[in-house]
Image (tube, rainbow, N blue to C red):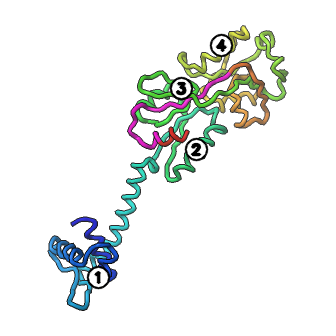
Amino acid sequence: MDIQQIKYFLILAEELHFWNTSEKVGITQSALSRQIMSLESELNLKLFDRDKRNVSLTSAGQYLKEKWQFELSTLEIVHQQALQIHLGKLGTIKIAHPDSISSTIIPEIISKISYAFPQLNMELLQLPYSQEEEALKNYKIDILLSRDMNQSVFLHSKKLSSDNLCLVVPTDHDFKTPEDITSVNLANQKFILTYGGSDSRYDSLLQDIFKHYNIHPSSFISSQFGSTIISLIKKGLGIAILPQSYSHYDPIGLRFIPLPFFSDLYINWRKDDPNIIIKNIMDLI
């Protein structure tokens, strides 16, 4: 017994006419009759009462018609879902990203993916820098957006954009323009620092900025998440250096003063990953 035989049976059960059914399914009456007899033989029961003029369902045939119509409909749905998964249009994808792009690039990327693959589920996560690479390698996430280009031999890394770094201060701060940012003026400022780890390219970039202005800030607060740093700045607890993309996050009460430094944004994913969804997304992005 196969699915095609069941389909023949269900159409005949509706038509109750061999010639009409054979025309509908595109096979000869004799071939259709053989398929039905084969099905009856395998099931060891009679599905139709038939003579030269009439065809009618037996009680067993009526029962199977009702059951198989539902089962076949469910099977078709399952098949279509499996096909969508095979084509990379259905399933779940986990994307980790830095806090800084929550109000800019992330909405754009997710909108593009959702439009192309409306049935795809997406989970968005934010991870400490120290956990990002291992999470990607261990399949805890599928795609990583990061301020660091990954150097692992197991991962691909592609630059997406660059973001101007800014000195972020409260609106009532004395710093108004880039000309106000000098070594002398910065020397006595309290900095709220981001911390990714000693091997983080972003942290290394911050150290380059401090060297550029010849300052050695001492920080009593550090955080891996820029949204937390922004809240602390608003409370007057210090100033910070953050990507300009945070100006779209919650700019009220803050001033973003551009610095002559930029932070790159990379997208990272596993090499030779068999998940077709990832390939589809990377082709899209």
Residue name at image x 50 percent, y 53 percent: 119
Left or right of residue 14: residue 110:
right
Q: Is residue 245 above or below residue 196?
A: below
Left or right of residue 8: residue 263:
right
Check disc 4 and report the residue beneath it: 208
The disc placed on residue 129 is 3
Give the amino acid at mark 1.
Trp
Residue bounds of the magenta highlight: 262-279
Left or right of residue 213: residue 77:
left
Nearest the camera: 232 or 176?
176
Residue name at image x 79 percent, y 33 percent: 253
Nearest the camera: 148 or 113?
113
Q: CA distance from mark 3 to mark 1?
A: 70 Å
Badge 4: few (under 14), some or many (20 or more) residues near its Cα, within 10 Å? few
Check disc 1 and report the residue beneath it: 19
Badge 1: few (under 14), some or many (20 or more) residues near its Cα, within 10 Å? some
Closer to the camera: disc 2 or disc 3? 2
Question: Helix or strand or loop: what does disc 1 sit on?
Answer: helix
Q: CA distance from mark 4 to mark 2?
A: 33 Å
Q: Position of residue 103 (x, y in %)?
A: 66, 39
